[in-house]
Image (cartoon, rainbow, N blue to C red):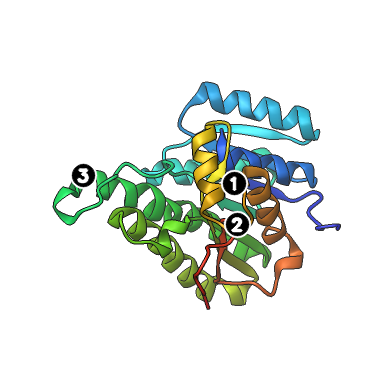
């Protein structure tokens, strides 16, 4: 399928590894020039070289701090200057699993909870706020926010909260920006195979979904590439589960 992405320009936060890097590579393989953003310069620059070598497209590394408005503004400005504009923003900059591992109310650490939300919810707002005027001016854009299937689970209150926050922000942005040609969608991966996944984690994931194996980062990336394309115009404001199917649950 031709996704009509040739020549588009994208920012992918959290693009130095895992799902974010897979998304950046998938977009680049479809003809998109990408700016990848993350905190660690060395790993970021290595990822940019990998993506450029594999795809033949530009991959520009930008050091970025999700908790800083100045950093988000500078990221978008850098991308516009380097690529000549932007068409796509993928927000994937978050700590996998989050800082807060508390399973009980009494164990929630305020500082960790606030930092999780600052990175994954408010951080997504910061980059979207910086990018939106460029999308609106050209009358077209895509924002894809990466959440997580913890949105549908109890047991880790802060993990649930931050992913619900991603869905809520996504729908608000979609309602505001949709009439101006900008579609905003959330994708909620479950356990996903990345370079850091061990055999036990893969086994547990396979036992907990309906496809009998762990979903790969490349499969999440393929979904995001479609959502980033002009072909996804009918999807706006929705939250898409992408964990291989949760047994016994019906979402509507």
Badge 3 vs badge 1, beta-carbon distance below 8 Å: no
Q: Quadrant of the N terminus?
A: bottom right
Residue 164 sits in which quadrant? bottom left
Residue where numbered disc 3 is placed: 111
Residue where numbered disc 2 is placed: 244
Whole-percent x, y for residue 10 in the image: 65, 48
Sequence-earlier tag: 1 or 2: 1
- Residue at x 30%, y 56% (from the top left corner): 155
The residue closer to the viewer here, 135 or 155, is: 155
For the view shown, which residue lies furthest in the left direction?
106
Depth check, mark 2 against mark 3: the one in front is 2
Whole-percent x, y for residue 167 in the image: 45, 65
The residue closer to the viewer here, 158 or 117, is: 158
| Label 2, residues with CA under 10 Å away: few <14, some 14-19, many ≥20 | many
The span from disc 1 to disc 2 (Cα, nearest Å) is 7 Å
The span from disc 3 to disc 1 (Cα, nearest Å) is 32 Å
Secondary structure of the residue carrying numbered label 1: loop
Whole-percent x, y for residue 224 in the image: 65, 55
Residue where numbered disc 1 is placed: 214
Depth check, mark 3 against mark 1: the one in front is 1
Badge 1 vs badge 2, beta-carbon distance below 8 Å: yes
| Residue 85 in sight | no
The span from disc 2 to disc 3 (Cα, nearest Å) is 33 Å
């Amino acid at each position: 399928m031709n996704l009509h992405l040739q020549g588009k320009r994208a920012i992918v936060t959290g693009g130095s590894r895992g799902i974010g890097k897979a998304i950046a590579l998938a977009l680049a393989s479809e003809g998109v020039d990408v700016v990848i953003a993350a905190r660690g310069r060395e790993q970021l620059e290595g990822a940019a070289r990998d993506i450029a070598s594999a795809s033949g497209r530009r991959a520009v590394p930008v050091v970025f701090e999700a908790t800083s408005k100045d950093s988000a503004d500078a990221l978008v400005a850098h991308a516009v200057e380097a690529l000549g504009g932007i068409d796509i923003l993928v927000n994937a900059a978050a700590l996998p699993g989050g800082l807060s591992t508390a399973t009980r109310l009494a164990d929630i650490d305020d500082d960790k909870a606030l930092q999780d939300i600052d990175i994954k919810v408010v951080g997504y707002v910061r980059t979207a706020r910086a990018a939106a005027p460029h999308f609106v001016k050209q009358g077209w854009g895509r924002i894809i926010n990466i959440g997580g299937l913890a949105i549908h689970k109890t047991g880790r209150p802060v993990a649930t909260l931050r992913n619900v926050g991603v869905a809520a922000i996504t729908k608000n942005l979609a309602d505001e920006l949709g009439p101006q040609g900008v579609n905003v969608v959330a994708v909620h991966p479950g356990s996903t195979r990345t370079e850091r996944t061990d055999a036990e984690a893969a086994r547990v994931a396979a036992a907990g979904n309906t496809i009998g194996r762990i979903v790969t980062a490349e499969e999440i990336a393929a979904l995001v590439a479609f959502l980033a394309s002009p072909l996804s115009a009918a999807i706006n404001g929705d939250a898409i589960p992408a964990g291989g199917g949760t047994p016994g649950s019906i979402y509507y």
